[in-house]
């Protein structure tokens, strides 16, 4: 998944200052250079994410993935997320490595991302060199590539949590705000350059001939960028081991008048409930009364059952915001994850199933490269629009921004689907950036639990992964992808107008 999906998940880890281990201890001011170094990993992650979003579907189709399994690869990662997110998060919160609580997990997830990229970008070449039987080669090429995609997507989704928790553990409130600003800046910059890498025709350049193919070139640059950015990040700010913190610092006693949970605390991985200004989950409040020590409070894992229970007990305006978020991400992912394939097959008229030296396949590749230019335009405009939002919000309000994003995206994708033209499609790619920022609006402004919004992103990916393959197989054309994205966005536009409201 893409960058914005990770933003919500960043708040589901429990930081040292939030769980009482540092109490009111004042953290030193971090130099701007150190915060920039810390943010470099977001550049590397988003750079690799962009390459994945642009090329995974073309790679899978080029190795022979059947149309009936067109979107299945995007179904597995969010399911794994529901199952493993509480386990990984809890292990990170209680890690006693002398290297710190977060950095061991960040390093592990970076290695998993590298292995995943190596498999999905080089799997076909390796299998072709080892297996001669065409049928066995097809099965192994598809299997290895899909395993690589799932491994990379899983690691890239999960790494955002410990990265943000690492920032929160070692920075004061002011430095956290600066650090998150740099994270967002480098995320947009990394995505734009990642798409730009995919837009270059490496097959006709010397580097492409030396390394073998454009996929190997993309792996080389992606791995290089991720490794360098991760090293810079891991060396940015020292992280105290948990055992040193717990032995050297005595947690302050909570004041008797304090509520069971503070309104800005208890961001534990996998938790889907926390206190709002006017909303307290009754079950969690009871748990807080039973456990006077904040370090011993029981937090329930984020599962499908607990998610549905939380949604059912939310005030209606919070629940409607979650539903609109689900609709928005379903529309956005339907288009973004398959956009380059749409460009190659529909706009350019290429065929990913043709022989790799055929004219049809080369035309398809050219369409994919031009699609990367479109996604690069989307990424750049998304960053620019984030600044325009600050001006627009005073005129049309938060709900107006939300409504406008859905409306423009729905109209833009609908026009692309009905009139597939290279130049108009590239121009309308700017509207994708409006939508990506609109789906982030409630996370920044509303009172809905961020972990619940993260679940909406995962549920959207499950819906896309489980449904689009069937639609493509039924319709016999990938044009149904952008038409579906347009229809869902316009439905979301109506839902926002009728049900969503913001509570100050």
Image (tube, helix red, strand yellow):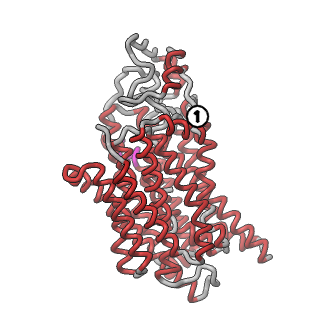
Instruction: Residue lying at the far front in this picture: please name it.
Output: 498
Q: Kindly state the secondary structure of the residue where label 1 is placed.
A: loop
- Magenta residue span: 34-39
The correct choice, above or below, for 472 with respect to 85 in the image is: below
The answer to whether 327 appears left or right of 124 in the picture is left
> Which of 363/458 is in front?
458
> Is residue 178 at all visible to an observer of this figure?
yes
Q: In what quadrant of the picture does the C terminus appear?
A: top left
The residue drawn where x is 51% and y is 61% is: 222
Image position, residue 106 (x, y; %) = 53, 43
Relative height, residue 292 to residue 394 (above, below)? above
Which residue is depicted at the point 35% across and 72% down?
428
166 relative position to 476: left or right: left
Residue 35 in magenta stretch: yes
Residue 234 visible to an observer of this rendering: no
Residue behind mark 1: 301
User: Does residue 138 sit above or below 445 in this rendering?
Assistant: below
Identify the residue shown where x is 33% and y is 65%.
408
Residue 399, position as x, y percentages in the image: 30, 50
Which one is in front, 462 or 475?
A: 475
Does the magenta portion include 387?
no
Residue visible at 37% across and 53% down in the picture = 496
């Amino acid at each position: 998944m893409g960058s914005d999906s990770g933003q919500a998940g960043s708040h589901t880890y429990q930081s040292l200052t939030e769980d009482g281990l540092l109490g009111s201890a004042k953290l030193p001011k971090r130099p701007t250079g150190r915060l920039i170094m810390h943010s470099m990993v977001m550049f590397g992650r988003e750079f690799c994410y962009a390459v994945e979003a642009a090329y995974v579907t073309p790679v899978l189709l080029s190795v022979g993935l059947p149309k009936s399994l067109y979107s299945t690869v995007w179904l597995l990662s969010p399911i794994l997320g529901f199952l493993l997110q509480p386990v990984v998060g809890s292990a990170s919160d209680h890690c006693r490595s002398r290297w710190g609580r977060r950095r061991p997990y960040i390093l592990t997830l970076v290695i998993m991302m590298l292995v995943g990229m190596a498999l999905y970008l080089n799997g076909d070449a390796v299998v072709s060199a080892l297996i001669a039987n065409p049928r066995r080669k097809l099965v192994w090429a598809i299997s290895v590539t899909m395993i690589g995609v799932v491994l990379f997507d899983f690691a890239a989704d999960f790494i955002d949590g410990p990265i943000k928790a690492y920032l929160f553990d070692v920075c004061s409130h002011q430095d956290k705000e600066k650090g998150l600003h740099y994270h967002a800046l480098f995320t947009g910059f990394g995505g734009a350059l990642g798409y730009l890498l995919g837009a270059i025709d490496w097959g006709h350049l010397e580097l492409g001939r030396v390394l073998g193919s454009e996929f190997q070139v993309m792996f080389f640059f992606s791995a290089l960028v991720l490794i360098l950015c991760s090293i810079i990040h891991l060396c940015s700010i020292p992280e105290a081991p948990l055992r040193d913190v717990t032995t050297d610092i005595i947690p302050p006693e909570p004041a008797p008048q304090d509520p069971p949970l503070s309104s800005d605390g208890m961001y534990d991985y996998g938790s889907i409930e926390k206190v709002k200004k006017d909303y307290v989950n009754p079950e969690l409040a009871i748990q807080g009364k039973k456990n006077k020590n904040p370090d011993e409070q029981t937090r329930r894992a984020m599962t499908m059952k607990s998610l549905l229970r939380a949604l059912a007990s939310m005030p209606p305006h919070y629940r409607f915001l979650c539903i609109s978020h689900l609709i928005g991400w379903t529309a956005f992912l339907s288009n973004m994850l398959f956009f380059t394939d749409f460009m190659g097959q529909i706009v350019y008229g290429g065929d990913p199933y043709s022989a790799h030296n055929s004219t049809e396949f080369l035309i398809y590749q050219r369409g994919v490269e031009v699609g990367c230019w479109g996604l690069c335009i989307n990424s750049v405009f998304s960053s620019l629009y984030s600044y325009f939002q600050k001006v627009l919000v005073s005129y049309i309000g938060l709900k107006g921004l939300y409504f406008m994003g859905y409306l423009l995206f729905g109209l833009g994708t609908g026009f692309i689907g009905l009139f597939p033209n290279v130049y108009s499609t590239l121009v309308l790619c700017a509207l994708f950036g409006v939508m990506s920022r609109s789906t982030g609006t409630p996370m920044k402004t509303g009172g809905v639990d961020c972990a619940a919004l993260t679940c909406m992103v995962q549920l959207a990916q499950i819906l896309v992964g489980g449904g689009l393959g069937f639609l493509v197989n039924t319709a016999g054309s990938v044009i149904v992808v952008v038409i579906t994205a347009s229809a869902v966005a316009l439905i979301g536009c109506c839902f926002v107008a009728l049900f969503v409201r913001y509570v100050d």
